[in-house]
Image (cartoon, helix red, strand yellow):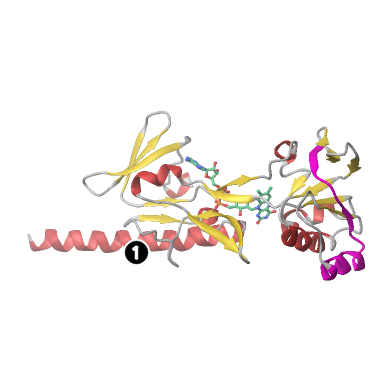
Amino acid sequence: MAGYGGTLVAGAVSTVTRNPDGRFDVRLEDGRVLRARRLLAASGVRDVLPDVSGLAEHWGTGVLHCPYCHGWEVQDQAIGILATDLGTSIHQALLWRQWSDDVVLFLNGCGEPDGGQAEQLAARGIRVVGGKVAAVEGGPQLGGVRLDSGELVPRQAVVVFSRLSARAGYLADLGIEPEEQFAGGLYVGTAVAVDAAGATGVPGLYAAGNLTAPMTQVMAAAAAGLAAGAAINGDLMAEDTRLAVEAHRR
Ligand SMILES: Cc1cc2nc3c(=O)[nH]c(=O)nc-3n(C[C@H](O)[C@H](O)[C@H](O)COP(=O)(O)OP(=O)(O)OC[C@H]3O[C@@H](n4cnc5c(N)ncnc54)[C@H](O)[C@@H]3O)c2cc1C
């Protein structure tokens, strides 16, 4: 980045406001203020995990959410699916079954599979365990799922349905309020609304990546950043030309 003239500044942004001259004031938590004509927000999401003890400690290692991110690594292992929504957890169980023939669905008080669902689970050899889940346990490696009954079901990986909350608090002063996102009618998190070029409703403010599309992955996030970068350049070019024409006329 530096080789192409960019400057990398370490620090957390606390607020962004619009300066009277139209530029953005980007305020860091340590008090520094950076000024910019255009801004591309790419601050991603916060993963909101179900409220079950032990999940956060193992997040991204033994506690997983996405078969396309982690399936290869846990193939043939003992996998548990922790239900927080019955339909979603059955969908997850069937997906993760492609990676292992030892998949257990923990119903966790989310209801009972209906006849058709039970038949699918049985046909794919997915064991269903009733009762509420108290915790996931283990040391550095995940050990298993502890039920309210006290029983420990040994598992090497546990799959959850995490919600994805847009990290956009620092944009609130500009009027940016993330919108709720749904997939198949299910609440999945929040996102900042943008057009195809990444422009938000605030002139000069662009956003890309998971901040605007929480369900997408690295390649899509990078592609969105590229598209927004090109749009910002076009935007700056138009402004520079307008200013040059005004100066030329004077
Ligand atoms: C456990 C897990 C595994 C995954 N595995 C894969 C995988 O194998 N393949 C794949 O393609 N995708 C994977 N993903 C998804 C992938 O991580 C995201 O899609 C991708 O990182 C999104 O990129 P982004 O740039 O939009 O956001 P991020 O990568 O989240 O980057 C946002 C950055 O902004 C910073 N930030 C946030 N707020 C502020 C602030 N106020 N001030 C300063 N900085 C701030 C954050 O610290 C972070 O560095 C995985 C996700 C998770 C949770």
Rendered residue at 46%/63% (across/down): 227
Residue tagged by mark 1? 234
The stretch in magenta equals 115-136
The quadrant holding residue 118 is: bottom right
Q: Quadrant of the C terminus?
A: bottom left
Residue 124 within the magenta-colored segment of the rendering = yes
What's the residue at 37%, 29% (across, down)?
31
Query: Residue 242: horizontal and vertical position, in percent?
Result: 20, 63
Name the one closer to the observer, 241 or 35.
35
Q: Nearer the viewer, residue 146 or 15?
A: 146
Q: Amino acid at mark 1?
A: Gly
Magenta-drawn stretch contains 76: no
Return the residue nearer the eye: 245 or 146: 146
Q: Position of residue 81 (x, y in %)?
A: 80, 52
Q: Residue furthest bottom?
A: 116
- Label 1 CB less than 8 angstroms from ligand 1: no
Q: Is residue 200 left or right of residue 47?
A: left
Quadrant location of residue 100? bottom right
Residue 215 seen in render? no
Image location (x, y in percent) of residue 194: 43, 61
Q: Is residue 17 left or right of residue 20?
A: right
